[in-house]
Structure formats: C-alpha cells, structure tokens
Image (tube, helix red, strand yellow):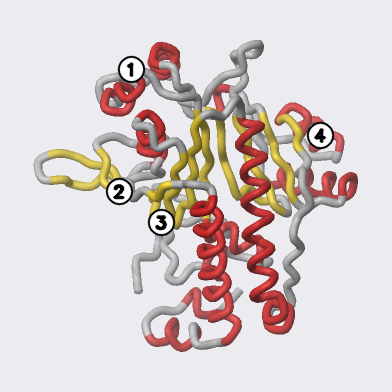
Amino acid sequence: MCWWIRSSGVFAQLSLRRPEQRLVFEVQTTLEQAMRAYWARRGFIEIHSPKLMGTFSESGAEAFKVQYFDRTAYLAQSPQFYKQMAMAAGFERVFEVGPAFRAEPSFTARHETEFTSIDMEVAWTDSHQDLMALEEDWLVEVLTQVADVHGQALEELLGVRIDVPVRPFPRVSLQEAQAIVRASGHTPTKTDDLDPEGERRLWAHVAREHGHDFVFVTDYPVTARPFYHRRHRDRPDLTQSFDLLWRGIEITTGAQREHRYDPLKAQAVERGYDLEPLSSYIDFFRYGCPPHGGMGVGLARLLMVMLQRSSIREVTFLSRSPTRLTP
C-alpha cells in the first residue's frame, strides 16, 4: 500500500509525484477516453444526472441525508432512476461517469463513501444476457487500449501485465456458484449472495477450470436485488440480474429492468416501499417504456483489480471513507 494514503496535505502531494502513482492516473485517463470512444461509436448519449435527490435510489440505510432548504434531500447512490427515465424519453442508449455516494460504515479495502460510478443503460434488450454480451465487448475494447498505450510502463513500474480477456466470459448462476463454493470447503455466510471469501473461491475454480479471470454470476433471488429488477417469467423468485467478478472481486452489478408500469408498482409495494416518494420515477413508465437494462461499474475498483493494487485507496486521487474528509 502506498504510504501517502495515510498522510495528508503536503505529504499527499509529494507522494503523487512518484512515477508509479502518476502512472495510475495516466491509465485512468486512457481508460475513460477508450470508454467514451466506444460509446460514441455506438450512438450512446451522455447524461449528467442530479446528485441531490428527493428520495434514495437504492437503500435508505445507505443514503446520506442533507438539509435542502426546508426539507431533506439525499446524495445520489447511483443515477439508476434517471437512466431509466432516459429510456422512457426515447434516448435508448445512455452513459454517465460521475460521483456516487454510499453511507456504508465499511472499512474494507474495496469500499469508499464517495466514488466515481460508470453507468450504462440500453433499450430493446431481451434479457440480462444481452447486457453481459455488451459488457464483454466494452471491456475487451477498453482493456486492449490500455494495454496498447501503457503495457510497457505498467510492467516496468508496477510489475503488472494487462491480459485482455477472451470472449465469452464464463457464466454461472448464483445457485451454481454457491454449490461450487461449498464444494471448495467454504460455507457461504449469505443464502442470496456471495460473501468475499466465496467470490475468491469461485474465481479460483473458474481460473482452474476455464483459464479465465472473469466470471458472471447470474440470476440472483428477489431478496438480494432492488425492486426494479425484472423477474424470470418461469421463476418469479429470481431476477434477470448479474454481477461480474474479476479476480474474485465484484466490479459490476447489472440487470434487465422491469419496464411495465403495473408490475413495477406491484414489486415496489411487495418490497414495502411507499409509492408516493417514488411517484416521480414510477410515473415515467405510465405511458409505456421500451424493455431495457443496464449496469454500474466502480471506476476505482476496476482500476484496483486491473493494476493489482491491494486497496482501492491506492487508485483514488483523494479517498473518502467513514473517517476521512481531508484533504
């Protein structure tokens, strides 16, 4: 871990002069440029969604409350609702690179309270399978660009080689993943998700059996996903959703969305939500919306795994955690 992470003020700026640290942000720049080039060639529209919201977009327990004149607002946990509003408005393909906030009292090496979120949403998808194919194509292109531009410097300064993955990426359902994890000798601590140790063991299995560092975990139970994820017609207890793991660390969460007005309302009520605070979102679907889906990727977590750093703070310009607000 870079020593400047625990420093502040002048020590941080001196550490950032090190060639190894500068290279991290040069790679980040190339990565974002390659992403934007990919989106531009495929007709995506860039949006900048509000970061002050009247209601939370994921879980209220993880939202920062702020005083907004005479009422309470929330810092955006993701641009999720706004991406879907763009689908209803006919934009069909959108992306956003912007800040997101999570009020999680987490002190792990891969969580921050403020982070840069990379989001995509596309219309006319049939299922989450279409979205996984899109992410494969996107990642292969942007990682190829990073390897071409920075491959030699990364090997010399960080001892890191960028291996561009081969498509298609392995895919396993959560049920299959948990069976693999249990067979490895680890009992998952969750019944509707993978814990960090389970993610690492699944990766070890996939690397051994398939020679691949990526794996999609699919079909999470309703209990593990937001109310707006679309459910399987023949298995309404499962969602058309996925996570993408890279070297045993989750870098992406995505899903086909529920685009139909009545089922969307019913799923929100089923999960115990008051429809009134959600009305500005749900009303976008009242007069029809194309089937659609999307995903969110954490920029720093993507860089952390790519550059094989031990902490997300090593690839964040100035990190924010539950105990850090300066510099």
Q: Position of residue 194 (x, y in %)?
A: 67, 38
Q: Is residue 170 left or right of residue 252?
A: right
Q: In this view, does 26 lie above or below 233?
A: below
Q: Do tag 2 and tag 3 residues touch (Cβ < 8 Å)?
A: no
- The numbered mark, 2 or 1, whose residue comes first in the sequence reads 2
- Residues under labels 4 and 3: Cα distance? 34 Å
Tell me what residue is drawn at x 66 percent, y 32 percent.
129
Tell me what residue is drawn at x 43 percent, y 60 percent.
321
Residue at the disc numbered 3: 114
Judged from the image, the secondary structure of the residue bearing numbered disc 1 is: loop
Q: Which mark lies nearer to you, 2 or 3?
A: 2
Q: Is residue 176 left or right of residue 20?
A: right
Amino acid under label 3?
Glu
Q: In this view, does 10 lie above or below 38?
A: below
Tell me what residue is drawn at x 63 percent, y 28 percent.
220
The disc at residue 287 is 1
- Residues under labels 4 and 1: Cα distance? 46 Å
- Residues under labels 2 and 4: Cα distance? 41 Å
Residue at the disc numbered 2: 51
Q: Nearer the viewer, residue 209 or 73?
A: 209
Residue at the disc numbered 4: 182
Q: Do tag 4 and tag 3 residues touch (Cβ < 8 Å)?
A: no
Amino acid under label 2?
Lys
